[in-house]
Image (cartoon, rainbow, N blue to C red):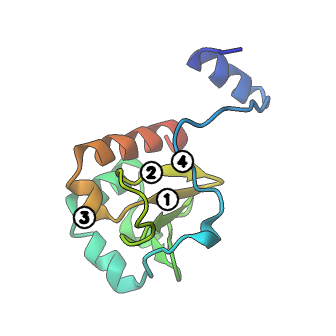
Amino acid sequence: MSITTKQFDQLTEMGIDLWQGRTSCCIDDTKQYNFITQSQQNVTNLTKKKLFSDILRSLNLTIGEVKAQDDHLDVGLFNWYFLNKNIDENQKNEPVISFINNKLISPDIETIAQSTNLKKQLWHTIANNLL
């Protein structure tokens, strides 16, 4: 049985969880993937990227609220994991951006900034899950 987005949103607001089939690869076990190691220096470099600054602004966050952890950025509301470019040589298509269990998983900002398709995926994911 299929339902509309509005019906799904209403059921979700009532606390009714629905099973949804996924059309693309979803990453739900972060331990099996290689992520870019994060440091405070990486956060400082990210703030120089317009796309990253725009994302923070859209989430009403400041750079002071972003903390570098071992393999992700702690952004308060969620953890942001950046995939290592060499995670899967068998994957021929563009990486998928996903949001599962308060974990945003995406390629690095430079890769996203160079691809309109990835930018669309990122903004769609943010709009649907974080705003």
Measured in 3D between alpha carbons, the distance from the residue under mark 1 to the one under mark 3, in whole angstroms, is 14 Å
Q: Is residue 126 left or right of residue 114?
A: right
Q: Which residue is at the front of the view, 126 or 106?
A: 106
Q: Secondary structure at mark 4?
A: loop
Crowd rating for badge 2 (residues with CA inside 10 Å; few <14, some 14–19, many 20+): many
Going by the image, does 44 lie left or right of 64? left
Would you place residue 2 above or below residue 57 in this image? above
Q: Position of residue 85 (x, y in %)?
A: 36, 70
Q: Earlier in the sequence, mark 1 or mark 4?
A: 4
Q: Identity of the amino acid at label 4?
A: Cys
> Which label belongs to residue 110?
3
Q: Which residue is mark 1?
A: 105
Residue 20: name its quadrant.
Answer: top right
Along the polypeptide, which appears first: circle 3 or circle 2? 2
Task: Say which amino acid is labelled 2.
Answer: Ile
Along the polypeptide, which appears first: circle 1 or circle 3? 1
- Sequence-first tag of 2 and 4: 4
The residue type indicated by label 1 comes to Ile
Q: CA distance from mark 3 to mark 2?
A: 14 Å
Q: Which residue is mark 4?
A: 25
| Mark 2 or 1, nearer chain start | 2
Q: Report, in whole angstroms, how far the alpha carbon at label 1 lies from the one at label 4.
A: 12 Å
Q: Position of residue 69 (x, y in %)?
A: 52, 80
Please tell me whether mark 4 or mark 3 is closer to you in this view.
Answer: 4
The residues tagged by marks 2 and 4 sit, at their Cα atoms, a distance apart of 9 Å
Q: Are marks 2 and 1 in contact (CB under 8 Å)?
A: yes
